[in-house]
Amino acid sequence: MALAPERRKVIVDPFFRGMGEIFSDVDAERLAQLFEVVWGRDEPMPLDEFEAALPGTLAVVSSGWRYGPILGRADELRAILTVGGGWPPELDYAQCEKHGIRVLSAAPAFARAVAEMALALALACSRNLVAEDRAMRAGTERFLSNADDLDTFHVLGKRVGFVGFGNIGRQLRRFLEPFACELRAYDPWLTGAYLREEGVEPTGLVELLETSRFVFVLASPSSENEALLSRDLLELIQADAVLVLASRAHVVDFDALTELVLAGRFRAAIDVYPSEPLALDHPIRGASGAVLSPHRAGLTKEALREIGGRVVDDLDAIAKGLPPRRLQVAEPELASRYVRTTTVTTPRPGAVAT
């Protein structure tokens, strides 16, 4: 009788996410069958236990990197899999590359959810859904109002500009196909040939802002794009356009954005903020031309469970000596340029951390 292959050791420490939040029963069972799971609890793993378990460990599944500069002691470590959508800035990516340790992000698991929400936010803005809902509840609605009063418009056939064209942008492009939009993209990390192959026309940032009816800000935060959309650039946006901010507020001069939306220069749909939770007295809360969401675009049950499935799939591949395909692999040319941006303040009573 053939002996069962030895299960490799994997540290699973996903806090702030819970095990049941990201692993379905099926994926949890797959994980346990394929690997010797160390920790695998909802609480953060004590650092001394982590260090004791590290020798001989094939991979670490975590929400970031809070374990310090210990890669030199990770003799058999081949991968670090993060269950968040970003890249841990605390990691030394050059050392990871030197030691043959892949760094993987769960960003692809969130792409469909965020893209779907971005489209929903754009529709809500262009059709004034939130304002009409408030009017109905207050009894001040205008049924079948005169066409002269209309300030709503279709997504159908409009020019759409993407600022950043990564996982979310590619998924959103697919969702927009039935709307027959003219799609343009600005992304200095991608070549024009690649963008055209993906079905969007590469465009300079100024032209994109000046000519797009819908602007989707989807760029990942980096050391190079803080406040990329400055006041001067935001003022180029068409008066009847919609800006959807669904990546990180880092990319936008948020004070200028707030002032311009309050002044009625254009509409905005916003899911991310410089500081979260957003201060109760922040002026964007009073902007009638804004649709606001509390950083929940990626939070669906399906997206969270997709994380677990992708993690187990790639762990299985790595254990077999195959390249991981389901999560996003950190590229040496880019990984060190990503930054963590959102300031998380102390949650208010009743606020839900995301």
Image: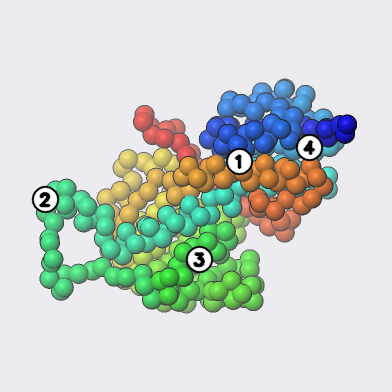
Q: Nearer the viewer, residue 26 or 302?
A: 26
What number is the disc on residue 193?
none
- Which residue ends up furthest to the front in the rendered image? 1
Q: Secondary structure at mark 4?
A: strand
At a point 67% along the width and 36% down the height, the residue shown is 30
Given this view, does label 4 or label 1 mark the residue nearer the observer? 1
Residue that label 3 marks: 174
Q: Name which residue type carries label 4.
A: Leu
Residue at 16% over, 52% down = 136
| Contact? badges 3 and 4 (CB < 8 Å) | no
CB of mark 4 within 8 Å of CB of mark 1? no
Query: Rounded to the nearest whole Å, what is the CA distance between mark 3 and mark 2?
Result: 38 Å
Q: Which kind of residue does numbered mark 1 sit on?
A: Gly
x and y percentages locating residue 315 in the rendered image: 72, 42
Q: Which residue is mark 4?
A: 58
Mark 2 neighbour density, 10 Å: few (under 14) some (14–19) many (20 or more):
few
Which residue of the protein is positioned furthest toward the right in this rendering?
1
Label 3 is placed on what type of residue? Answer: Arg
The amino acid beneath tag 2 is Gly
Q: Are marks 3 and 1 in contact (CB under 8 Å)?
A: no
Q: How far apart are the two marked residues, 3 and 4, measured between alpha carbons? A: 36 Å
Q: Which mark is residue 308?
A: 1
- Please indicate whether residue 319 sits to the left or right of residue 217 in the image: right
- The residue at which mark 2 appears reads as 139
Q: Are marks 2 and 4 in contact (CB under 8 Å)?
A: no
Asked where in the image residue 122 lies, by quadrant, the reply is bottom left
Q: Nearer the viewer, mark 1 or mark 2?
A: 1
